[in-house]
Amino acid sequence: WAAASISGPDDYKTYTFTTPTLAGGKRKIEVRAQNSVGIYSQIKSETVTIADPPNNDLFNNRIVIPALAYNHAVNTAVIPVPNEDDPSDPLPRSDTCTNTSKGKRSVWYQYTATNDEEIYLDTFGTDYTTVLSVWKDENNNSVISDDELVTCIDSSSGQHVSLSFLPQAGTTYYFMVSQYNNFAGSMESSFDVSGQGGGVLIFQVSEVKNRTYLPMMFK
């Protein structure tokens, strides 16, 4: 445990602490108090679910989307701190992407278009601000650079973002979802299990437009 502190009036105290890094799964935290004469209180417990870090937080570990429609939910708040700011990530900048700094806690996906029909992407239901961008590896070197951007949208006009583009059949596209200007999102519990920011990302790709904010339910 680290940075433990007690605060509050004489009749009510708040005990704050940060856990060490914990592996994914359910964890039960138990707390009891001891008064001035050594008598313990009843044990108070809280069970929290800690998500495993996403596997696709680095470009080389991107998820290959086999077919559309596709959806994926992941907790980016638990990306390990050493991976939360990948210096190799490109910076999406355009008329619809005004973020001035690289977003942290990015995740990557790959999809090869099977036809020339319009593709729709969104982060509806995500609980933090996002940047959604589409890329092509024009240089065929397995490295995505700033000038290989196809299109992007960010949360400058609202938390939930969506975009569409016309692909070329047989062309491979890369989708990056990152945190808009590194704005912190919300955590699933009150326990800080890793770093800051991020949250629950819901990413959806389809050939049918999601016309309204009707987030899918993930458990």
Image: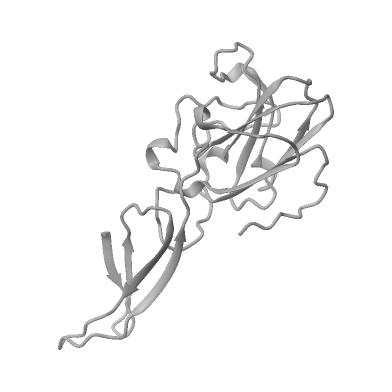
- Which residue is located at x 81 percent, y 51 percent? 212
Q: From the image, which quarter does the N terminus lie in?
A: bottom left
- Which residue is located at x 82 percent, y 31 percent? 118
- Which residue is located at x 40 percent, y 42 percent? 80
Furthest toward the left, the residue is 37
- Which residue is located at x 70 percent, y 31 percent? 96
Furthest toward the top, the residue is 139
Place of residue 81 in the rendered image (x, y in percent of width and height, measured from the top left):
39, 41
As drawn, 159 above or below 169 = below
Furthest toward the front, the residue is 66
Most foreground residue, 217 or 96: 217
Residue 191 falls left or right of residue 154: left
Figure label count = 0
Chosen colour scheme: one colour
Residue 46 falls left or right of residue 217: left
Residue 53 falls left or right of residue 70: left
Give the quadrant of residue 140. top right
Q: From the image, which quarter does the C terminus lie in?
A: bottom right
Place of residue 154 in the rendered image (x, y in percent of width and height, measured from the top left):
65, 37
As drawn, 17 above or below 71 = below
